[in-house]
Image: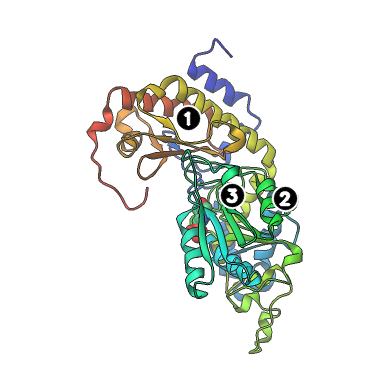
Amino acid sequence: MGNLSGEEKALALDRDDPLQYFREKFLIDDPFVIYLDGNSLGRLPLSSIRYLEQVVQDQWGTHLINSWNKDWYRKSSEIGDKIATIIGASPGEVIVSDNTSVNLYKLAFAALNYQKNRKVILTDEFNFPSDVYILQSIIQITGEKFHLELLKSEDGISVAEKELNQKINESAALLTLSHVTFKSAFMYDMKKVTQLAHEVGALMLWDLSHSAGVVPIELNACQVDLAVGCTYKYMNAGPGAPAFLYVRKDLQEKLTSPVWGWFGADDPFDFKLDYIPDKGIRKFLTGTPPIISLSAIEPGLDMILGAEIAKIRSRSIALSEYFIEQFNDQLLKYGFGLASPKSSDLRGSHVSLKHQEAFRIIKALMDKSVDGYEIIPDFRPPDNIRFGFAPLYNSFHEIYITIKKLDQIVRQRLFENYDHMKEDVT
Ligand SMILES: *Cc1c(COP(=O)(O)O)cnc(C)c1O
């Protein structure tokens, strides 16, 4: 496609893509909004609107409490089994429950209780703050028996294998990392890192929030012990939809959840006063699940299954490579830096750029009066702009327009028209 103009090339890439028709399956009511934040909150699938209406109207409205038996009671397991198919786990190893932070608390606590005679929890300085807070809270509540060690990055983008090799040893109880890190999109080699943890006898817990639904994951093949992840990012389940957790089959009987709620009991409806946990993965449930949000996971998940993870990954790489190629050609000269790994093997589905004026550049990107488009990336302080590429609905043409607008904003210094005020959520 050497002779095509940037825009023609983008349009041709869109035309030739096997997943191009998925975009129509989402609510996109304003084509002049370019949404590049699907790694924070995915777009709304049209099928979710119809399905949720049915859940509310028929299941709740008409069938009331009878829906517990008919539709709701097994839902956490049914959707868990479906999620298992996109993360390389087996039936009965995944359950949907609570949010990612609470699931991390339950699994990390259980793992540490099982590894009582070890001292160290290992994570990296790139981990999502909530994950680190959860680990800190466990350390405090268990009487400071454990301490947290952070793997460091030399380049601010990735964590070197050498660093992991140096820090991990037989004192490690638990190694817990985000598979794809939220800022730089650096992606760990799941198999290699899990193996390293096992060589020293540590348990491995992955947070899949930024990779589930967009990157092929093989939990069983990598012999992963534990995992958590959220459903409202690339899985498009909607704001606050409950998260998932995975416990490898043979570990389920060995681990105990720290939160003993009735939904985790062997028979929640016998109303006995002594807690007997469920024998399988359901022991990690707590109380009544949010049925409406839980139901909202399924339509997005079905779409991913229909599109196939391998094809989603190919498109994700193609979109990101196109963005980086255009970035190198047009933007590098304006004070930007690439804050994500160059190689797609080491990168998830978002790309971060650094710029001193990141915050005001985003303001200009979001301003329709500049070029007719509202472009929505997100800002991570102090100088990071994240562009999330959701392969099911983002197009090459949207990236073309984004690069063009970025070029206009920095070349004409349009960001100077905006102030530095910060909003609560970006
Ligand atoms: C988004 C995200 C979370 C979200 O946690 P919640 O408790 O569901 O709000 C947790 N960890 C990582 C790595 C994330 O990217």
Q: Amino acid at mark 1?
A: Glu
Task: Return the residue nearer the eye: 361 or 397.
Answer: 361
Whole-angstrom CA distance, mark 1 to mark 2, is 36 Å
Q: Callout 3: helix, strand or loop?
A: helix
> Residue 222 got which mark?
2
Please, what secondary structure does the residue beneath circle 1 have? helix
The x, y position of residue 210, in whole percent, is 55, 48
Residue at x-position 54% and y-position 10%: 3
Q: Earlier in the sequence, mark 1 or mark 3?
A: 3
92 vs 388, left or right, is right
Residue wearing tag 1: 398
Residue 188 in the image: state x and y as whole percent. Answer: 60, 44
Q: In the rendering, at what x and y percent does residue 420 appear?
A: 25, 42
Note whether ligand 1 is within 8 Å of mark 1.
no
> Disc 2 on helix, strand or loop?
loop
The reply to whether the residue tagged 3 has its Cβ within 8 angstroms of ligand 1 is: no
Q: State which tag comes first along the sequence, 2 or 3.
A: 3
Nearest to N terminus: mark 1 or mark 2: 2
Q: Give the labeled residue for mark 3.
A: 166
Q: Residue visible at 58% across and 23% down?
A: 13
Which colour assignment does the render follow?
A: rainbow
Graded by Cα atoms within 10 Å as few (under 14), some (14 to 19) or many (20 or more), the crowding at tag 2 reads some
Q: Amino acid at mark 2?
A: Cys
The reply, left or right, for residue 310 in relation to residue 13 is right
User: Comparing marks 1 and 3, which lies closer to the viewer?
Assistant: 3
Q: Residue at x 29, y 31 (%)?
A: 369
